[in-house]
Image: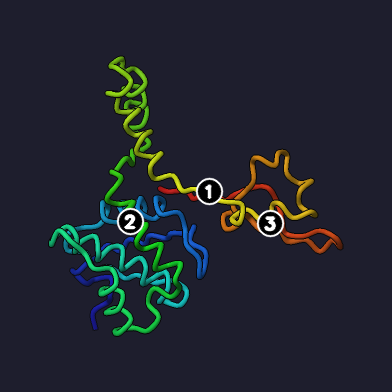
Amino acid sequence: MKNKNQSPNKRTVLQFHYNAWPDHGTPEELGLVQFHRSVIKKSQSESCFLVHCSAGVGRTGTYIGLDSLLRQGQDKGEMDVFEFVKQMREDRMTMVQTPEQYVFLHKALLCEYQGKGTTTSEADFPGKANKLLKDDSPLNQQELYEEFKSLSTLKPSYGDSDKEEATLPENKSKNVSMSILPVSKYRPYLTSHVKGRNDYINAVILPVLS
């Protein structure tokens, strides 16, 4: 019996973990799009992908939808989100589990097509930053200005209902300014056993992309 360490067949397995996606919720579209671009960039053309979340349906289906529909759009010049999600749910029930995830899938696809890849490695960043900052061409022709305009179109907007926990009477005193309030779905939740204290803090969690 041959020892498994003697096998001539070797494979490299890469694991990518996106940890800024709340269960049953949705992350920022741009964050997931950048994560997807990183996965594609670091994988080989013949690679097989295994996608999974806690239950393997909601977030899994949304990510598979993003990846597959982008490929469909590149190959055919068009995509059908409704039909693709319908087919996924026929193969495995509750893929793309919530209405919010279905809406998010549309927004993520739009974000992918509106934006462009701007990810820069740590080694290349100083050189690119110096080039952008030393650009003395007219403002509306500068690459940095173009990136700023692009980000401005992708920036999500949030209303009072998205920050309602920050405006509760018991939490108002915890805010330095009522004009700077955290969006509820992105804030950390504190755990306290002290009577009269709740889980609110004026802060948000920022995803880290490698």
* Relative to 167, residue 179 above or below: above
Residue 145: which quarter of the image? top left
The colour style of the image is rainbow
- Helix, strand or loop under label 3: helix
The kind of residue on which mark 2 rests is: His
Residue 122: which quarter of the image? top left
Q: Could you classify mark 3 by the number of other residues whose Cα lies within 10 Å: few (under 14), some (14-19), or many (20 or more)?
A: some
* Whole-percent x, y for residue 52 in the image: 39, 72
Which numbered tag is attached to residue 178? none
Residue shown at 40%/76% (left/top)? 57
Disc nearer the start of the sequence (2/3)? 2
Residue shown at 30%/52% (left/top)? 112
What distance separates the C-alpha of mark 2 from that of mark 3? Answer: 31 Å
The kind of residue on which mark 1 rests is: Leu
Residue shown at 40%/62% (left/top)? 104
Left or right: 191 as drawn, with respect to 106: right
* Whole-percent x, y for residue 185 in the image: 57, 58
Q: Which residue is mark 3?
A: 165
Q: Which residue is mark 1?
A: 206
What distance separates the C-alpha of mark 3 from that of mark 1? Answer: 19 Å
* Relative to 5, residue 189 above or below: above
The kind of residue on which mark 3 rests is: Glu
- Helix, strand or loop under label 2: helix
* Whole-percent x, y for residue 154 in the image: 39, 45
* Relative to 143, residue 93 above or below: below
| Count of numbered marks | 3
Disc nearer the start of the sequence (2/1)? 2
The one of 137 and 192 positioned closer to us in this rendering: 137
**Quadrant containing the N terminus in the rendered view:** bottom left
What distance separates the C-alpha of mark 2 from that of mark 1? Answer: 17 Å
Left or right: 206 as drawn, with respect to 146: right
**Is mark 2 in CB contact (under 8 Å) with mark 1?**
no
